[in-house]
Image (spheres, helix red, strand yellow):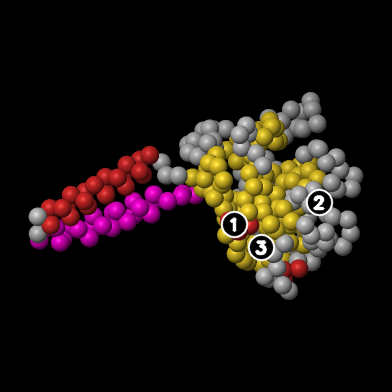
Amino acid sequence: MKNLKIFLPTIVLSLLVSFGAFGQILKYSQLPYMQGYDFSSETTVPSEVADEWVCVGGTPITEVRWWGSYYQATMYQDRNSNGYTDPTMSSPAMEIITSFVISIYDNVPGDPNTMYSHDHPGDLVSGYSLQTILIANVARQLYGVSTKPGSAYENVWQYHATLPEIFNQEADETYWLSIQAVHTSTTIQWGWHQTEKTVQGPGEDAVQKGDFPDADPCYWYFIPDTEMAFELYSVPEPSVLALFSASAGVLGILIRRRRK
């Protein structure tokens, strides 16, 4: 009994640590750049932004976190928020989005003999495209205020959601993530916020297509020296699950012995 009193706290602590790891784990991260801005990615304009990541380990993706902002273009809908006013700076409770659409594309390697000299999105991954997440199922909170070039300000909002379907990625494969807001406003745009490429972005530049002046809405245009802010979450590795099971088993045995 004396030994049990000594070691039981240690076992419980081990179990709690294991249980904490039993939840979702951060798999990939590109944090927002708080001196940058965001790029139109919504169904109203319409427009779409995609950024790539390389799968390490092959564990499935279960949750996504991303960052974005609102802006009012003073002319025809614009590609990004640079130089425009953020309406949520004066009305932070404003919400025009009804849902988000998450899509994942295969990667196509760049070919200097074609119009795409760099890697870019290919086909939508079979069985995983146009996954709609209602805004009621998205955790939204103010992340901070970004100082855009030109000393303008905009609120940066953080969004976090569980994917409607788990994405079973393959190890060492490159994929492209697309996030689009769905709303009905004709005067306000939503944009996906950028990361600081020199610090956070290790891969290809993000791409964007949309109904903009002098642009082909079917063509992916590279956003020079820019990648997007997002994080991917996965389930734990099998070794972590084994640790959790072992800890729970040991604790159960000790409890039963104590009762005897």
Q: What residue does disc 1 label?
A: 138
At which x and y percent is residue 235? 45, 44
Residue 62 in sight from this viewpoint = yes
For badge 1, the amino acid type reads Val
For badge 3, the amino acid type reads Val
Mark 2 or mark 1: whose residue is earlier in sequence: 2
Cα distance in 3D space between marks 2 and 1:
22 Å
Frontmost of labels 1 and 3 is 1
Residue visible at 67% across and 44% down?
178
Mark 3 or mark 2: whose residue is earlier in sequence: 2
Could you say which quadrant of the image residue 135 lies in?
bottom right
At which x and y percent is residue 215? 86, 43
Q: What residue does disc 3 label?
A: 156
Residue visible at 63% across and 44% down?
131
For badge 2, the amino acid type reads Val
Range of the magenta residues?
2-27
Cα distance in 3D space between marks 3 and 2:
20 Å
Which residue is outermost to the top?
A: 113
Neighbourhood count class around disc 1 (C-alpha, 10 Å): few under 14, some 14–19, many 20 upward:
some
Q: Is residue 172 left or right of residue 84?
A: left
Cα distance in 3D space between marks 1 and 3:
15 Å
Q: What residue does disc 2 label?
A: 45
